[in-house]
Image (cartoon, rainbow, N blue to C red):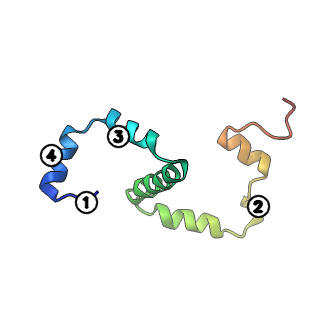
Amino acid sequence: MCLAPNLREAYLQHVSIEAIRNELRALPSAERRKLMAFMVALEDEGREGYAAKLAKRIDDRSPERWLTPEQCERELGLPSERDPK
């Protein structure tokens, strides 16, 4: 939806978060995933230097700084697939 600035401001003053949530629930899963990716990218825009820092880490070829899958799982708080359930 592309509204003129004055209409957009009026709309945003009257729409509730709950109304937005209801609209999002109605979206197909693929559209919600696109929206989530957009929201993450939008949030990252506000972090100065974040993209460059992330790119530097991705490009790091130093094995001594790499994490094992188990370390990643611990860092993310995920259960290890190797742990008995």
Q: Are marks 1 and 4 in contact (CB under 8 Å)?
A: no
Residue that label 4 marks: 10
Instruction: State how far apart marks 1 and 4 are (Cα).
Output: 13 Å
Using a 10 Å C-alpha cutoff, classify the residue at mark 1 as few (fewer than 14 neighbours), some (14 to 19) or many (20 or more).
Answer: few
Q: Quadrant of the N terminus?
A: bottom left
Mark closer to the chain start, 3 or 1: 1
* Residue type at the position of mark 2: Glu
First-in-chain label (1 vs 4): 1
- The dot on residue 64 is 2
Asked if the residue at tag 1 contacts the one at tag 2, i.e. Cβ–Cβ closer than 8 Å, the answer is no
Residue drawn at 16 percent across, 59 percent down: 4
Task: Tell me the quarter of the picture where residue 41 sits.
Answer: bottom left
Q: Does label 2 or label 3 sit earlier along the sequence?
A: 3
**Mark 3, residue position:** 20
Residue type at mark 1: give it: Cys
Q: Are the residues at dot 2 and dot 3 in contact (C-beta closer than 8 Å)? A: no
- Measuring 19% from the left and 45% from the top, which residue is drawn there? 11
- Residue 2's label in the rendered image is 1
Distance, label 4 to label 3, CA atoms, is 15 Å
Q: Quadrant of residue 78?
A: top right
Mark 2 packing: few (<14 Cα in 10 Å), some, or many (20+)? few
Of the pair 22 and 34, the residue shown nearer to us: 22
Cα gap from disc 2 to disc 1, whole angstroms: 49 Å
Q: Classify residue 45 as left or right of residue 80.
A: left
Percent from the top left, x then y, of residue 38?
Answer: 44, 56
Secondary-structure class at tag 2 = helix
Relative image position of residue 18 (x, y in whole percent): 34, 33
Residue at x 32%, y 36% (from the top left corner): 19
Q: Position of residue 47 (x, y in %)?
A: 41, 57
Q: Is residue 56 above or below residue 6?
A: below
> Which element is circle 3 on?
helix
User: Counting residues from the N terminus, which is met first, the one under dot 4 or under dot 3?
Assistant: 4
